[in-house]
Image (cartoon, coloured by chain):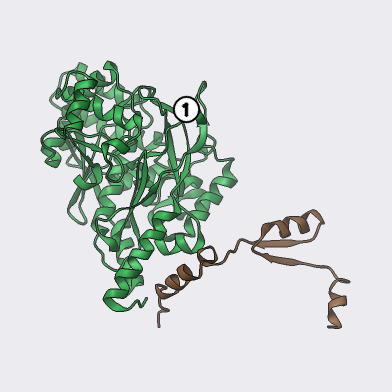
Chain colours: A brown, B green
Amino acid sequence: MAGIGDLFRQEIRVINLGLEAFALTLEQLGVPVIHVAWSPPAGGDPRKAALLAALADEEEE
Amino acid sequence: MSIKSANQQALGRLVEAQPVLADCLPAEQAMGLTGRTVLHAGPPLAWERACATMQAAVLCAVRYEGWAPDDAMALNLVLRGEVRLGPCHHMRAVGPMTGIITASMPVFVVENRAQGNRAHVTINEGLGKVLRFGANDESVVERLRWLAREAGPVLGAAIRASGGIDLRALMAQAVRMGDEMHQRNVAASSLLARTLMGQLTRARADTQAIARVADFIGGNDQFFLNLAMAVGKACTDPCLGIEDSTMVVAMARNGTDFGIRVAGLGDRWFTAPVEMPQGLYFPGFGAEDANPDMGDSAIVETVGLGAFAMAASPAVVRFVGVGGMQEATRATEEMAEICLGEHPHFRIPALDERGTPVGIDIRKVVETGITPLINTGIAGKTPGVGQIGAGVARAPLSCFEQALEAFGSRRQSTRGYGG
């Protein structure tokens, strides 16, 4: 845990996943940020996510 | 077959289709559309659920065919079941907006020479008061009669004389010239006119008739839209029935419902209430005047054009309410997230020659929650008004969720899933 203090004493560069509001706030503060538009599969519906997993493409050998 | 292999087969069949404009003939002759039948856009629709704009167009078509002298008597025929309604899609055809086709209307015949199937579509009527937007006065009927009496036969003779016009090559060139082929068809219409010019003069018709037809084509920037739609239908129909494929083969709206069909799920429609388009309105009109989205024209998005090719069409982005080129590029990139691949023939110069995204996968739509974006004209909700604007609409997520459930159930019962 000693390193966490060091983290904020150096330049912070952020990859933000999901909620864009966090990225926008950091941008306003001048923090370099890359936003990744990500959301849970099927909007987080576990039944649909299971169905999608069952119907996923198999990896080619 | 694995879903992946089935989808590769379906996508290959779609993008390697060879659509050729082969003829223009009355629907009765070309499609076997007989009797008192009115075809309409979208999934099946009962008369009482049809919006006022669709109803007005159906009654106008009944008058045009001479089955009834006025709307009241036309309505009686419909209510008594003496005029039947049916989707264009069920008769190897597509229609823009209301999508009306009856027996005597001339239709273009597009032949897919890779698979041997045919698709049909009416001649685009032009702008202003037209049947496809629900306009229904005598000027609309008179134009329809001229199309049947003069334009259809002249165009048919010219097309036959040409031996067939390669539409895939023409469309690939038009995409490079800035058409996305839903809201913008200037390049494709011009290329077609150039191709037809010599053949029109060789057609067996008097020079005044040729001049009228040439003026009609030249005066309508959207003339090619209907052909782009028939190409979409000709390319997607052979994919219907590839059992293990999750690729969408039709998206269509009837002003009440939005419907999709999926390659692996046969003729079945998956429907949900259609959404309102968002866009720009002609002066004097606003969102409160708009009819819910309608037309079979979303078949062009199904084959990787329209909103899917938005980045190819800088001239149209403002017209359809999209902010600018950056937003148009984002729209195309977003659609790529729900597609199986890129079109090998429809390439976008502004995106480093990448192909347009094509082959919507119902799994990707449900997984991402990204629904297909559709460029569309906006019809007035009051019968007789016609077009009042243009914009974009989204396909309802529910259609894709229902289709995925059905696909999962069928696959589980036949083989216990497996990719």
Task: Indicate whether B189 appears above or below B382.
Answer: below
Q: Is mark 1 on a helix, strand or loop?
A: helix
Q: Is residue B372 left or right of residue B203?
A: right
Quadrant where the C terminus of chain B sits is: bottom left
Please tell me which residue is depicted at 32% across the width and 25% down the height of the picture: B130
Task: Indicate whether B246 appears above or below B186.
Answer: below
Q: How packed is label 1: few (under 14 Cα within 10 Å), some, or many (20 or more)? A: some
Q: Where is residue B376 in the image (x, y as percent from the top left)?
A: 43, 38
Q: Name the residue under label 1.
A: B289
As shown in the figure, which amino acid type bears the numbered disc 1? Asp
Q: Nearer the viewer, residue B321 or B405?
A: B405
Q: Can residue B139 be seen in this view?
A: yes
Please tell me which residue is depicted at 21% across the width and 18% down the height of the picture: B70
Please tell me which residue is depicted at 34% across the width and 37% down the height of the picture: B225
Q: Nearer the viewer, residue B75 or A23?
A: B75
Task: Indicate whether B299 appears above or below B406.
Answer: above
Q: Where is residue B140 in the image (x, y as percent from the top left)?
A: 28, 21
Q: Position of residue B87 (x, y in %)?
A: 24, 43
Q: Is residue B94 left or right of residue A46?
A: left
Read off the chain for label 1: B
Which quadrant of the structure image shows residue B1? bottom left
Count the labels in the image.
1
Q: Can residue B361 be seen in this view?
A: no
Task: Indicate whether B34 appears above or below B338.
Answer: above
Q: Nearer the viewer, residue B266 or B346?
A: B266
Please tell me which residue is depicted at 42% across the width and 73% down the height of the picture: A56
Q: Where is residue B403 in the image (x, y as percent from the top left)?
A: 36, 60
